Structures are given as C-alpha cells and as structure tokens.
Image (spheres, helix red, strand yellow):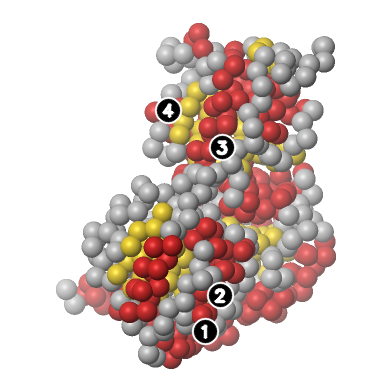
Amino acid sequence: MATHDNTTPAPRLGGHILVDQLSAHGVEHVFCVPGESYLAVLDGLHDADIQVTVCRQEGGATMMAEAHGKLTGRPGICMVTRGPGASNALAGIHIAHQDSTPLIVFVGQVDRGTRERDAFQEMDYKAVFGTQTKWAVEIDQVERIPELVSRAFHAATSGRPGPVVVALPEDMLTEYATVADAPRYETPDTAPSPAQLADLAQRLAQAKRPVAILGGARWSAQAVADFADFAQRHALPVAVEFRRQMLFPTTHPNFIGDVGLGGNPVLMTALREADLVLLVGGRLSEVASQGYTLLGIPAPAQQLVHVYPDSAELNRVYHASLAIQASPAAFAGALAPVQAAMAAGAAERLHTLRTSYLGWSDPDIVTHPGALQMGRIMRYLNDTLPEDAILTNGAGNYATWLHRFYAFRRYGTQLAPTSGSMGYGLPAAVGAKRLHPDKTVVCFAGDGCFMMHGQEFATAVQYQLPILVILVDNGMYGTIRMHQERHYPGRLSATTLHNPDFAAYARAFGGHGERVETTEQFIPAFERALASGKPAILHCLLDPEAITPTTTLTKIREQALAASGSR
Ligand SMILES: Cc1ncc(C[n+]2csc(CCOP(=O)(O)OP(=O)(O)O)c2C)c(N)n1
Ligand SMILES: [Mg+2]
C-alpha cells in the first residue's frame, strides 16, 4: 500500500480503523472472548501494540476490563461477540454501572442488511443495554468509527464514569475507508469555585459534629493524600462508603471505618448524630445509607455538603446544603488553602471514634467455631502483605473478614463490587495481575462465589499470572442461608453446596493447590503458594457455624425461633 502522510491517510479496513482508535486513545490491554462477528478487529489486534487477554467467558472478560478501569481511571476495554457473548457480558457491565467504572465493551453485530429479522444472534443493544450503560451505540458507517469511538471514551470517563457499549455490524468492519484517527481523549474536569470553598470553610467552622464520607470514582493516590491532609488539619473524622476502603488509609488517625453491611454501630450513631456530612465522590446509595435511613430524603437533617463530578447526581436523592460539582481529585487538590476553626472537642470526638474503629477492626479479638480461625488469617495478612498488595472479592459472608479486618493502606489496592456481584474476585484478580505483574494479588472467594467465574483460573494459568486465591469453603451459599435462618428458621432451601476438591482443581489447571483445614496449616500453605510462582488456590475449610465474625448459624436460628414463638 502506498505511503500516505497525515493529511491523506491510506484506506484502512474497518476493523483496523477501530484498533487504531484504541491505540490513539492510549489503550494497552484488551480482554476478549473471540467471535466470528468481529474477525476484522481481531485481525487489527494482530499487529497492534496492545496486550490481548483471551478469556473463557464474557462475564469474566468484562470484569477483568472493569478491574482495569477501576485501577487506572481509564476505560477498561472488552470485546465480545453478538447475542450470547453480549448476554454474558452484562454481568460485568452491571458492575461498571453500579461502581461508576469507565468501561467500553465492543460487541459484534449482524450485517446491516439483515437487521430487524431476528437474524442469527441479533440483539437490539440500545434496548438491552440502554439502562445499564451511559451510552449504547451502533456504528453504521465505517467512516464514523473515529468519531464514535472518541465519544465512547469521553462518555465512559466524564461526569460519573460508567460503561459504554459499542456495537459493530460485521459488514461495516470489513469495509475500507479513508479517515484520520481521532486525537487522544481528554476527560473534562470541574473544580470547586473559591466561593464554594469559602462556604465550606464557614460551614466547617460552625459545625460541632462534622464527618466526611468518601466514595465513588475519579480519585487518585494524590487526591487521597490531599484529603488526608485536610482531614488532619481539621481533626475531621473520615469514613468510607461500602467497599471503598482504598480511598483513605485505614491506618490514618482520622479513619473511623466503613459505612457498609454490618457496620460498626458506634460509627452509625455518629453519622446519624452528625450536624455536617461532607460527602465526597459518593452517592450514599442503598447499602452505604443503611437502606436509605442515614440521611433524610429529600432533605437530610444534617447539613450535607455533596461533592460529585456529575450534576445529575447532585440533589437527585439528597438535597444538598452545598452542592459542588467537581471530581474528588479536583476537589481534594483545591483543599490546601482551606483552614477552618475547629469545633471545641473535635480532637476528643475523633479520638473516641478512632478508638472504636480500632477495636471493631481488630482481628485478634475474634474467635468462632472450627479449627480454621479467620481472625488469625487476617492478622497474618495484615502483618505480611505488602502495602500495595491488591485484594479482590465478589459477594458472600466470607468478604466480611476482608472488609472489616484487612488494613487497606493505599489507593489502588481494592477491587470489590459495590453491586454485590458474586464471581467478581477471580477475574478481577486476573485483570489486576495482568496490569501489575509485580504486585501481590490476593483474591478472596467463597465456594459459591468462586464457581461463578472459576473457569478464569485457566486464564491466570495461560498468562502465567501467579494470583493467590483464598477460597473460603463453608459448603453453602452462606449469606442466603443466614437470611434463611433469620426469616424461615430451620427450613433449609436451595442453599447447600456439594463442592469439588478445589486444590485438585487448581492443580488440574496447572496451578498450585492446597487444602487448609486448620489455622496452623494456613501460613506455611500461603508461603508455599507464593513461592510456587503459579496461580494458586488455598482451599480453606471454614466451619459453617462461623457465619459472621460475631454470631453463629445456630444462634441466628435460635433467636429467630424464639422470636417467632413469642409472636
Ligand atoms: C451473581 C450473584 N448471584 C447471586 C447473588 C446472591 N447471593 C449473595 S451472597 C450469596 C452466597 C455467596 O456464597 P459464597 O460465595 O459461598 O459465600 P458465603 O456467603 O458462603 O461466605 C448469594 C447466592 C449475588 N449477590 N450475585
Ligand atoms: Mg460459602
């Protein structure tokens, strides 16, 4: 093909134009499950400077890409085939939507000339993904690939970040066109005005019981450090939303805990009794708000200063006394000059809340039935994992151990779905290790959770990603069993699991696997797993009675029976 300069680009295949846009926007990784519907794109990837991870199921692929979005702030990229592939991908798209993670999912589509006939694997993507994405689009003209892909990057990252679905009709991808690449995307940002910062300072100065809650996306390590300085100057107690522990070091003297499931009652009382809530980046959605009970709707009793990058979220649920449209990063970066007088007793109040948090999160004080003690395991991990180790999980009661007792110390160390999506931990760990081969990546999974995307252990083996899975096996869908015992005591229904030998599973895939039945076996097994240099599963047998750090299944059932008997 003749050489062309920038002003007269050569004709390119649609699939190649698409891949060139990814390069133009700085993409380094793509996660995919191949399909005949987008062969021209796969061909473009053949010569691109992009690492491709071929996965075993589209849900896992999308979760890996979502994990990249969470860790980098740039859109994770996933490619899947038509109807069946797109259907599987929804699992990861839903997480990106709820977690406000930038993600772009490219989906194959039938030829333009066969649409609306319910052709083979045809799907109306705008209809199917319309409510779960920030934008769903089908590229009908090959010449428009640069324009629409550029918009996809901007849509995924601006305001409240989220997922975008881009459908690619097969015959469009095989056409040639002469078009220029788009310039690299730049996400617009908004910062607080001087007047808003002055207003904030005044409210802080007048507040007697202020508290900050951090959440959401568009943070950075620098933003966390900036906010920590601000909090320290004001003796401001800082909490984080459900599964957002990495937004503030748990070891910092101003950290008072997380506002999630089964939270510290002392913290919940402090939040209810606060007279000023500074909510930065978060939405105080259902779990964090304790079922929408923490703040009044629409008008909270507390003064609410809400900092959020998207105007659509401000005043949507909670009427803010002061609404600041800014990303957490821009807001935290502007806080340096803010200095308000501290309320009398601020330091003592912080000390009380901090002391309560330290007691609440101390793994040494917990014991439960069984030979394997989760508190001891958490103590070991806190003492030995490097500060920048990345911890992942899905959903299940096993995750409580991680979120209550693990000392997250740095930004970029947590991959946990606020959507409560089971199965996320393993693909997230694979995605994280692909991005940071030098970091320790530990996945927590339940026996139920792991099997949802357990096939991606093969992806870890294929790409030689020595992640470490702590698989907590209690022989049941424990969370649901817990609720069952509370509401229908003794009436087990569809919550018991008969599990495989997960250590043998790991070995069958080419990884390292060990069975761990006692606390004493855990540490040497963990060390051997790390030393193996292979993806590893520690199959940890947890007594089913150890349903939460504070109670047992039997106690829950007895309490429920006693309550129903007294009715
Ligand atoms: C994809 C998905 N399906 C179902 C649920 C409902 N659910 C929440 S927790 C849970 C049980 C989790 O079991 P397991 O991973 O074994 O953890 P455990 O609670 O036993 O510790 C289920 C079924 C969910 N959150 N996500
Ligand atoms: Mg379980």
Task: Give the x, y percent position of residue 513.
Answer: 74, 59
The disc, 4 or 1, on the residue closer to the chain's N-terminal end is 4
Q: Earlier in the sequence, mark 4 or mark 2?
A: 4
Could you tell which of marks 2 and 1 lies nearer the N-terminus? Answer: 2
Residue 229 got which mark? 2
Q: Splitting the image into 4 quarters, where does residue 224 fall?
A: bottom right
Rendered view: 215 above or below 508? below
Three-letter amino acid code at the position of disc 1:
Leu
Q: Are marks 3 and 4 in contact (CB under 8 Å)?
A: no
Tell me the residue at 63%/51% (across/down). Answer: 72
Residue under numbered circle 1: 358
Q: Does the beta carbon at disc 3 come under 8 Å from ligand 1?
A: no
Query: Would you say the residues marked 2 and 1 are in contact, meaning their CB atoms lie under 8 Å apart?
Result: no
Instruction: From the image, state whether disc 3 or disc 2 is nearer to you.
Output: 2
Amino acid marked by disc 2: Asp
- Marks 4 and 1, how far apart in space? 48 Å
- C-alpha span from label 3 to label 4: 17 Å
What kind of element bears circle 3? helix
Image side of residue 548 versus residue 372, left or right: left
Q: Are marks 3 and 1 in contact (CB under 8 Å)?
A: no
Say which mark, if any, is on residue 126: 4
In the picture shown, does residue 151 fall above or below 429?
above
Which residue is painted at 72% across and 75% down in the image?
384
Q: Residues within 10 Å of mark 3 (few under 14, many from 20)?
A: many
Q: Is residue 483 visible?
A: no
